Image (cartoon, grey):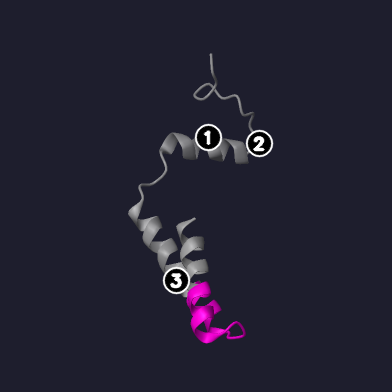
């Protein structure tokens, strides 16, 4: 989300400065988006192993009602 906001804001800012028909604002927006995406990814903690395991089970086609996450 932060990456999309940064990229969009950058594009709008440079379009106001360079004009609506300029191509450069898109390139600057992509670069800003990439930088923010990498920075936020490195700054946040990894996903918990239990959540990753549940996701892998779902991708494998196992039923969603696994014992760890089912409400009893």
Q: Residue at x 52, y 34 (%)?
A: 54
Give the image location of residue 13, x and y in percent. 48, 75
Q: Which residues are magenta?
A: 11-29
Q: Residues within 10 Å of mark 2 (few under 14, many from 20)?
A: few
Instruction: Pick the residue in front: 6 or 61.
Output: 6
Residue for point 63% across, 32% down: 62
Residue farthest top in this picture = 72
* Residue on which disc 2 sits: 61
C-alpha distance separating marks 2 and 1: 11 Å
Helix, strand or loop status at disc 3: helix
Which residue corresponds to mark 1?
Answer: 54
Q: Which residue is mark 3?
A: 32
Q: Earlier in the sequence, mark 1 or mark 3?
A: 3
How packed mark 1 is, by other alpha carbons closer than 10 Å (few <14, some 14-19, many 20 or more), is some
Compute the Cα span from label 1 to label 3.
Answer: 33 Å
Mark toward the viewer: 2 or 3: 3
């Amino acid at each position: 989300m932060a990456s999309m906001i940064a990229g969009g804001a950058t594009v709008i800012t440079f379009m106001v400065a360079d004009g609506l028909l300029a191509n450069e604002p898109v390139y600057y927006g992509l670069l800003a988006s990439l930088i923010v995406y990498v920075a936020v990814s490195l700054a946040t903690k990894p996903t918990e192993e239990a959540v990753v395991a549940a996701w892998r089970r779902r991708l494998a086609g196992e039923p969603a009602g696994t014992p760890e996450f089912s409400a009893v």
